[in-house]
Amino acid sequence: MKIEAVDIVVTSPGRNFVTLKLTTTDGVVGLGDATLNGRELAVASYLRDHVAPLLVGREADDIEDTWQYLYRGPYWRRGPVTMSAIAAVDMALWDIKGKAAGMPVYQLLGGRSRRGALAYAHTSGSTIESLFTSIQNHLDEGFRAIRIQTGVPGLKKVYGVGADQAKGQKYDYEPAGRTTIPVEEGWDTGYYLRHIPTVFEAVRAEFGPAMPLLHDAHHRLTPNQAAQLGRSLEPYDLFWLEDVTPGENQEGLRRVRSQTTTPLAIGEVFNSVFDYQTLITEQLIDYVRSSATHTGGITGLRKIMDFAAIYQIKSGFHGPTDVSPVGMAANLHLDIALHNFGIQEYMPHNARTLEVFRTGYTFTDGLLDPGETPGLGVELDEEAAAAHPYTPAYLPVNRLLDGTVHDW
Ligand code: CS2
Ligand code: MG
């Protein structure tokens, strides 16, 4: 079964997505997610101009060989653009292999290791009261694990805090502004470090000691500040504290780890196992945050997770709305098959997105499941996709209150 056609579909039903579509000589179609928030066209070009010509005529069944060919062949390797492009090809080939075999991809990865994948919801509020409403909304929807993000007194905008939700209203937050120049946000770490412990004290008092609570520090702290935050949150028994410090300085996590027992999750901006090597071998983290979309697909992320399993580190795959439904499905097939599964981030896509991508995965009683459809289980409506042309959109740039550029 040879690859006969390669199509790149860029669509924007509320936000930008890049999808790779491979068609074989037998007419089997495979889809892959190539979405990189704010750099979508770079990945689309990498696929169109540098990968597509190499794929036509290749054996669709040879997934590992194609992965290695695209990883080692270009000489220049790794990085988010390259690994997102490889991810899309990889996912599409697993989709094709599953369809040809008449099996959901998780069956090709070793079958089920669990009934379903525990999901966590995004909740937020500009105040404690509005946060409580957001939390209750998601408990009412069946979520059993909750990520908490709140406004910080003195700061106008904070990561993860969208408009306050009324009762029954869904969380909605798209940080990439549809502008040709990124918007800028202001930040003060002191305001933040003083405020966050009070939030978790209030949440634990209202919702009890047992509910799994997560929080995303979004790369903004020094290792020592991260250690301070981790220690100040220990009384509130978090499931994890995410991206406490920019993880490219992997050794920085030694300081954090030596000072606090709060579990740590890092890696949504990573794209290869080498980004994790010290973090994993020294057990400096508890969860791997990558998504299949940014780490070379199912093949790339599986390599990372099998390495992490040796060190008792679990998965916590990235699942915001800038991972497309195809990328979410790829995560879910790994979630079901892997032994060292931890939790799955789940920010449901909006109705417009789901008109373009028809998904087969389900969310029931707090658990996600990829479903039994052969392949990844997602179909792309190209006519609907064409109705939503690409619009430039960029993630914010963060600055300290004195104007110094900071991590967003
Ligand atoms: C966030 C992401 O979901 C998360 O944990 O860190 O939503 C991140 O802000 C976006 O993926 C950026 O595009
Ligand atoms: Mg995050």
Image (tube, grey):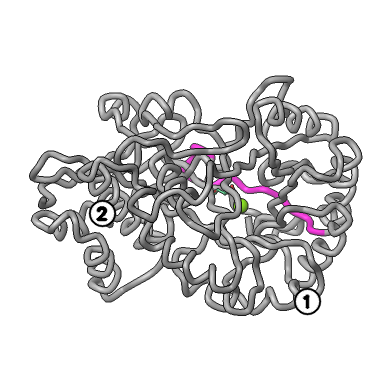
- Secondary structure of residue under mark 1: helix
Identity of the residue drawn at 41% across and 52% down: 293
Q: Quadrant of residue 355?
A: top left
> Label 2 amino acid?
Leu
Disc 1 residue type (three-letter): Ser
* Residue 45 or residue 380, whichever sits in front: 380
Left/right placement of residue 163 relative to residue 56 reads right
Count of numbered tags:
2
Judging by the rendered image, the residue that carries numbered circle 2 is: 47
Give percent across and percent down for residue 208: 86, 40
As drawn, the label of residue 395 is: none
Within 8 Å of ligand 2, the CB of disc 1?
Answer: no
The CA span between labels 2 and 1 is: 43 Å
Q: Position of residue 272 (x, y in %)?
A: 44, 68
Q: Residues within 10 Å of mark 2 (few under 14, many from 20)?
A: many
Q: Is residue 229 above or below residue 122?
A: below
Foreground residue among 194 and 358: 358
Q: Which residues are magenta?
A: 177-189
Q: Position of residue 68 (x, y in %)?
A: 27, 69
Q: Does dot 2 land on a helix, a strand or a loop?
A: helix
- Queried on whether the Cβ of the residue with tag 2 lies below 8 angstroms from ligand 1, the answer reads no
Instruction: Mark yes or no: residue 38 visible.
Output: no
Determine which quarter of the picture holds residue 268: bottom right
Q: Residue at x 68, y 76 (%)?
A: 252
**Label at residue 258:** 1
Residue 265, compared with residue 176, is above or below; it is below
Judge from the rendering whether residue 10 lies leftward or rightward of residue 306; answer left or right.
left
Residue 58 painted magenta: no
Q: On the rendered structure, is 386 left or right of 263?
A: left
